[in-house]
Image (spheres, rainbow, N blue to C red):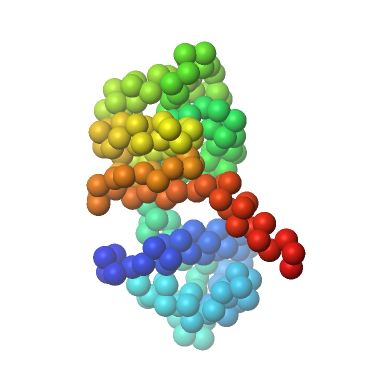
Amino acid sequence: MKEAKISPSVVRRLPIYLRHVQDLLDAGIDTVSSKEMGAKLDLNPAQIRKDLAYFGEFGRKGVGYEVEYLARKLEQILHLDQQIRVALVGVGHLGMALSNYTRFQNERITIAGLYDQDPKKMNMQVGKLRVKPLLKIEEDAKTIGFQIGIIAVPAFSAQEVCDVMIRCGIRVILNFAPSSLKVPANIHVRSTDMTTELQSLAYYISE
């Protein structure tokens, strides 16, 4: 596996493939071709074959991919064959929605810690978790072992939260704050600014 040469765009497509083959599994389908996947996902079959080929030879000519095997290999590639623990900072409306998102309960990615800087939210019960002060995350990280951090705080607090997460050993961060984060080269940050996304979509209204 030549991970250093794999582009972020390829990595972004892997969960799309995984969700599709999981749906096929649920439907009792045993094999699928790249042509069938491409038609369903609106992707070029050659692109699908190329993406998967980065990680090994999963298909057979004239047969396609064995769905169960491909699903298992994609889970391994994405590290979803293990439990991934997430620390979420910012228990506002968005943070609450993410905490209660039922898909997290069905996957290997689990929100294992909730943190906020608002004293009024301390010890608030959200599902099976209680909200803790931000500085408690460093202590919890030693026992829980967070692998991913989610930032759902206002822009002015985002960098501080990011710095705390990095000190805790978190190297992968999903940022919902409308703010660009400054991080070392070995930290992976994915930012999602819903306001910007909506504003860019507004451009197409006249069409």
Report the residue at 47% width, 18% height from top.
118
Residue 202: percent from left, percent from top: 67, 57
Q: Quadrant of residue 41?
A: bottom right
Q: Position of residue 92 (x, y in %)?
A: 55, 28
Say which quadrant the C terminus sits in: bottom right
Residue placed furthest toward the right:
206
Q: Quadrant of residue 162?
A: top left
Residue 201 visible in the snapshot? yes
| Closer to us: 203 or 38 | 203
Instruction: Work out whether residue 113 or residue 90 is closer to the camera in this orientation and state it.
Output: 90
Q: Is residue 53 left or right of residue 121?
A: left
**In the rendered image of this protein, does residue 113 appear above or below residue 162?**
above
- In terms of image quadrants, where is residue 114? top left
Depth check: give the residue in front, 166 or 123. 166
Using residue 22 as the reference point, say whether residue 174 is left or right of it.
Answer: left
- Find residue 56 and report its horizontal and vertical position in percent: 35, 72
Give the quarter of the figure containing the N terminus: bottom left
Is residue 33 visible in the rendered image? The answer is: no
Tell me residue 76's x, y (percent): 38, 57
Give the answer, above or below, for where 40 lies relative to 191.
below
Question: What residue is at 29 percent from the left and 22 percent from the top?
Answer: 139
Q: Residue at x 43, y 25 (%)?
A: 115
